[in-house]
Amino acid sequence: MNKTFNEPDRKAPRFRPKKVNMLNKTLYKKFIKKYPEYKEVDLSLFKDIITTFNEELTDGIINNRDGVELPIGLGFLFMGTCNATKSKNTDMAKAIKYGIETSHKNWETDNKLLKIFYTNYNSSYPFDGKHIWAFKGVRQFRKKASDAYKENYTKYIEVDPTRKISHLFIKSPKVKQYREIGNHIPEDYNEFKM
């Protein structure tokens, strides 16, 4: 039985959360204050470096089945295949067009879903506040990942909904190395001098 669908009121008041762009002049000034030897790097070059790194990270996540390990053991990011949710996933465009409630079926991927996973539990050396870290990809990353997933969804790891993600990374060779390091960071360590 098809349920009729009432088009939403597009002129109704909306709550829009305030967006914060972390890549700004304040971050640049803090960086220069902490690392004065890079004062010849201007704001536009600073932004270009960060943007280029993020684009390379995106390509690494998409092209590598196992994803990527973030620098200095901050965790892992990877794309995984999940079964469709049991809850309804309404296709708003078709529902508005036909006036009948319809659901997304993901025909391109045999009704499988893409999820982008981040984990830092059991995968790196301990650092303060690691339990509150999270990851949310920007729109460009999510779009690029979605397009790649539709092309070859069988490439990515199928994630068991009953197991923790951290179990996929426990056997990583870097894990032992980071556990041996612990919280000790050398005095002369500089993450910008590789």
Image (cartoon, helix red, strand yellow):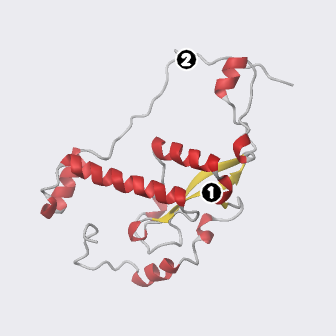
Q: Nearer the viewer, residue 48 or 173?
A: 48
- As drawn, 89 above or below 129: above
Give the residue drawn at x 17%, y 50%.
42
Q: Could you tell me the amino acid type at mark 2?
A: Arg
Percent from the top left, x then y, of residue 118? 52, 59
Q: Earlier in the sequence, mark 2 or mark 1?
A: 2
Label 2: element kind: loop
Based on the displayed image, in which of its 4 quarters is residue 96 positioned?
top right
Instruction: Name the quarter where the C terminus is drawn.
Output: bottom left
The answer to which quarter of the image holds residue 36 is bottom left
2 vs 1, front mark: 1
Residue farthest to the front, as pictured: 151
The N terminus lies in which quarter of the figure? top right
Residue 9: image location, x then y, percent: 58, 16
Please give the count of numbered marks on the rendered protein.
2
Q: Which residue of the protein is positioned furthest toward the bottom in this rendering? A: 180
| Residue lying at 46% horizontally and 81% vertically, measured from the top left | 179
Tell me where residue 66 appears, x and y as whole percent: 57, 65
Q: Circle 2 is placed at which residue position?
A: 10
User: Considering the numbered disc 1 on the image, is that residue within a helix, a strand or a loop?
Assistant: strand
Q: Is residue 76 above or below residue 153?
A: below
Left or right: residue 21 compared with residue 126: left
Q: Distance between the Cα atoms at labels 2 and 1?
A: 34 Å
User: Crowding at label 2, few (<14), some or many (≥20) Cα neighbours within 10 Å?
Assistant: few
Q: Residue furthest right?
A: 1
- Amino acid type at circle 1 is Gly
Label for residue 80? 1
**Residue under the image location 34 percent in, 80 percent down:** 184
Mark 1 neighbour density, 10 Å: few (under 14) some (14–19) many (20 or more): many
Foreground residue among 59 and 54: 59
